[in-house]
Image (tube, helix red, strand yellow):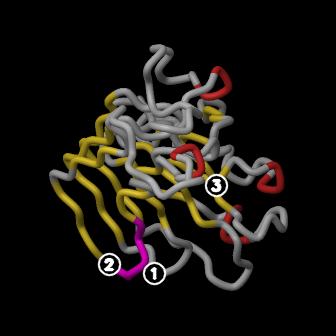
Amino acid sequence: VGLSVEALSNGFWIDDMLAVCRTNNILALPPDASANRIPGDGFGWYDTNQEHIITSSTFRNCGYRSSEWDQYDTSPDRGCAADSATGCASHSAVFTFLTHSDEHNPEVMQATKGISFENCGRRFRLKDYTNGGSRVSGRLQNWVDEDGSVTGFGRKSALVSGQVETNMWWDADDSVQHDEQGPLKFIDLDNGAM
């Protein structure tokens, strides 16, 4: 699977989803095709009409495996590798965020709860397919992780843009954690500091 699900329509709730990006089985591909050119992404947040909720869902074997993206899982078989038979593209991530627009921007309408990761590589990637640098939609990316199952806080938190151009916009207090994978910042919304 190149992408399990992408939020291209406004407003939906996914519950009890299992997204399996790779199985380690050899993919049947046309001649001259290669599995490592196909993304192994789990879910893509779009940049407009973000009225999406994902609950009680598992992502399995998603995201690229490399020493650069081992902050959450260091097992040697996590995610998908670069091999041409069973691998995935090196930009693959469990969650991707479309960030190419100055006109269409996300709002605080994305939420998760009860998310688990099984054998996953890179978890996050801000995705500007125009390669045009920082855009408003990238700087405003955010979502509420109702139970902290994605951030790892174990309580209500937010994942927000960590692009350099946001400067200290999202640094609500000293407990904000920077995640270089997106890049993102994780904000603990239930630590009593706010």
For the view shown, which residue lies furthest in the left direction? 16
Question: Residue at label 1?
Answer: 49
Q: Amino acid at mark 1?
A: Asn
Secondary structure predominantly adopted by residues drawn in magenta = loop
Looking at the image, is mark 3 or mark 2 nearer the viewer? Answer: 3
| Viewer-closest of 85 and 143 | 85
> What number is the disc on residue 11?
2
Q: Are marks 2 and 1 in contact (CB under 8 Å)?
A: yes
The residue under the point 49% across, 31% down is 121
Give the Cα separation between the discs numbered 1 and 3. Answer: 17 Å
List the residue tagged with mark 3.
Answer: 126
Instruction: Say whether residue 172 is visible.
Output: no
Query: How far from the left and from the top, in percent, is residue 182?
Result: 63, 45
The image quadrant that residue 171 belongs to is: top right
Left or right: 150, with 126 as reference point: left
Secondary structure beneath dot 2 equals: loop
Q: Residue at x 59, y 66 (%)?
A: 98
Residues 45 and 166: in front is 45
Span colored in magenta? 6-10
The spot of residue 94 in percent (x, y) is 46, 45
Place of residue 51 in the rendered image (x, y in percent of width and height, measured from the top left): 37, 74
Amino acid type shown at disc 3: Leu
Residue furthest to the top in view is 75
Q: Earlier in the sequence, mark 2 or mark 1?
A: 2
| Number of numbered discs | 3
Q: Can the viewer see residue 37 in this picture?
A: yes
Which of label 1 and label 3 is nearer to you? Answer: 3
**Which tag, 1 or 3, sits closer to the chain's start?**
1
Find numbered disc 1 in the image and state the secondary structure of the residue it sits on.
loop
